[in-house]
Amino acid sequence: MTRSYNIVSIPGDGIGPETNGAAVRVLEAVAQKYGFEPRITEYKAGGCAIDAFGVPLPGETLQAAQDSDAVLLGAVGGPRWDMIEAERRPEQAILGLRQGMHLYANLRPATLYKELGDVSPLKNPGKIDLLIVRELTGGIYFGKQGSYKSSEKLFDGTRKGIVAFDTESYSEAEITRILRRGFEFARIRNKKLTLVDKANVLNTSRLWRQLAKEIAGEYSDVELEFLYVDNCSMQLVARPATFDVIVTSNMFGDILSDLAGQITGSVGLLPSASMGNPGMPGLFEPIHGSAPDIAGQNKANPIASILSVGLMLKLHLGENDAADSISEAVRKTLEQGARTPDIAIHGDEEDKRDITLVNTTEMTDKIIANLE
């Protein structure tokens, strides 16, 4: 019997339909080679859903995602929806999917391909191969927020006026489950885990450290390192090759993964996986945004979305050979010199002699051709 999987595709906004469409093409091609069937249905979320239905996450989209085996998401948002009230902005679709699908672990690998060493902004980056494990459903993004008008004054007598607030909170259970994910991934990689926090200032971070120290005894084979988030930002630039697995809070992980994307050449290369408990559907998406400035121009780099398919196949569906085929096809395509604009060399003409500038469709075609 042919293995089949119910996959929900949410193209989203901006370049989302272009990169998500590329990912779907690769999924269909690799499925044919490896003998399984992806049953793909498409739904709206984000700005396009606001335009069509008045809400960023229609009920039918969330229900389909909850009933699926996995979700492939493009990107959501754009300046045309910036003036909408906060609770109806396109980004609420992502938060709603994460909450509704009970996803709490966001996995963001960052790898510097040797073929792209000259694209990294770092002079001597070394071998970069790290994984950011980001807590996804707690912290400041989901805490109590609001605003009020204050009659209080600053020290110089100026009235405060409107005061806005966002509250960070974390429970022991939320922290413990993501820490264990971090330790488990470190155990099967290079056995080093870095907890990134701000424990010198934040009470929530002090709880993260306390629990990490308690859990570390169960993982004596894993080296545990602590770094403040500001220091980690510097160390990711100064010594990126020394990192293995980073585990951190929702907001810190959001920020650091973009930094990791830049030092490896482009956020257009970085996939991500959002997962919950075993047996629950997962959400797979590139970490880049909707890039409205290049939307519809066939310029977007599809590699992050394509590699997100690889994560879905390896981490979630157990199609390891197909996942490895995608990874190798991407590497081979880069080795052959194909480059979208974001990863093209900006040096002299001699540097560019073996490089072929391609668009989204052409990059996807080349990766499919290299599937084995």
Image (tube, rainbow, N blue to C red):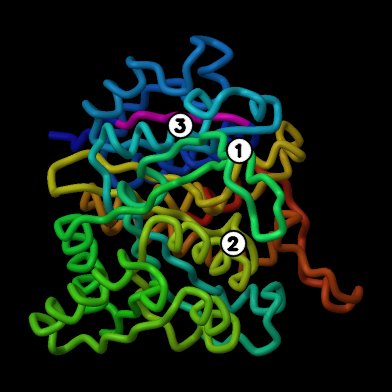
- In this view, 14 is above or below 291: above
Which class describes the residues within 10 Å of circle 1: few (<14), some (14-19), or many (20+)?
few
Q: Residue at x 77, y 71 (%)?
A: 354
- Among the 4 quarters of the image, the one containing residue 200: bottom left
* Camera-side residue of 68 and 323: 68
Residue at horizontal 72 percent and vertical 46 percent from the top: 359
User: Which numbered circle lies on residue 92?
Assistant: 3
Extent of the magenta region = 7-13
Question: Which residue sits furthest left?
Answer: 218
Q: Are marks 2 and 3 in contact (CB under 8 Å)?
A: no
N-terminal-most mark, 2 or 3: 3
Q: Quadrant of residue 285?
A: top left
Q: In which quadrant is the N terminus drawn?
A: top left
Of 113 and 32, nearer the camera is: 113
**Residue located beneath label 1 in the image:** 162
Q: Residue sitting at 42 percent across and 50 percent down?
A: 308
- Of the residues shown, which amino acid type is indicated by label 3? Gln
Task: Tell me the kind of residue under disc 2.
Answer: Thr
The vertical placement of 355 against 290, above or below, is: below
Residue 333, disc: 2
Q: Left or right: 56 with respect to 295?
A: left
Q: Quadrant of residue 216?
A: bottom left
Cα separation, mark 3 vs mark 1, equals 24 Å
Secondary element under disc 1, as helix, strand or loop, is strand
* Mark 2 or mark 3, whichever is nearer to me: 3
Residue occupying the point 48% across, 22% down: 56
Q: Earlier in the sequence, mark 2 or mark 1?
A: 1
What kind of secondary structure does the magenta stretch mostly adopt? strand
Observer-side mark, 3 or 1, equals 1
**Picture coordinates of residue 361, whole percent (x, y):** 65, 41
